[in-house]
Image (tube, helix red, strand yellow):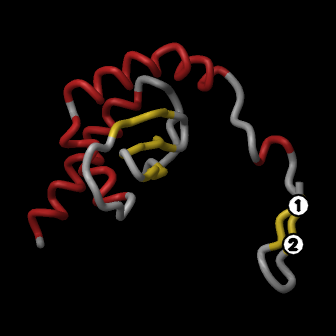
Amino acid sequence: ASLNGGFGKAYLLERDDFIIGGALVEELAGSEQAALDHMNADHRDAIALYARHFGRAAGDGWTVTGFDADGMDLAAPDATCRIFFPQPLQAARELRSVLVQMAKTGRAAEQER
């Protein structure tokens, strides 16, 4: 694929620029559904916080629809939102701690307002 980023900024992109592979992908895939079920059942407040603070998204009814090494996808009845993690995950076991830290960061920012 190619990307034209503006005058003098054209790039030829390779397969690896689009597709994340390796053990981490398999590890995340094996635990993703359990993480989605847990978040959507028990942490709707945190999901709404991710949408508001990190995604600058409005509205209610947000759910997490997917996790990958770079972030998460959220959906509401009339919107979708992509949230990137502060740093890509290096292992699936990092997911919980990253989500907890992001919730703390979002809550602290809302309290400062």
Horizontal relation, residue 94 to residue 68: left or right: left
Q: Are marks 1 and 2 in contact (CB under 8 Å)?
A: yes
Return the residue nearer the eye: 10 or 61: 61
- Residue drawn where x is 59% and y is 25% of the image: 24
Label 2 element class: strand
Q: Earlier in the sequence, mark 1 or mark 2?
A: 1
Task: Answer with the quarter of the image where residue 26 lies.
Answer: top right
Q: Which mark is residue 97?
A: none
Label 1 element class: strand
Check disc 2 and give the amino acid type.
Ala
Q: Which mark is residue 2?
A: 1
- Residue drawn where x is 48% and y is 33% of the image: 66
**Percent from the top left, x then y, of residue 30?**
52, 13
Query: Label 2 crowding class (10 Å Cα cut-off): few <14, some 14-19, many 20+?
Result: few
Query: Label 1 crowding class (10 Å Cα cut-off): few <14, some 14-19, many 20+?
Result: few
Q: Which residue is mark 2?
A: 10
**Percent from the top left, x then y, of residue 110?**
15, 63
Horizontal relation, residue 60 to residue 34: left or right: left
Check disc 1 and give the amino acid type.
Ser
**Percent from the top left, x then y, of residue 29?**
55, 19
Residue sticking out furthest to the bottom: 7
Residue sticking out furthest to the front: 78
Rounded to the nearest whole Å, what is the CA distance between mark 1 and mark 2? 7 Å
**Percent from the top left, x then y, of residue 43?**
21, 33
Horizontal relation, residue 109 to residue 54: left or right: left
- Name the image quarter holding the C terminus: bottom left
- Name the image quarter holding the N terminus: bottom right
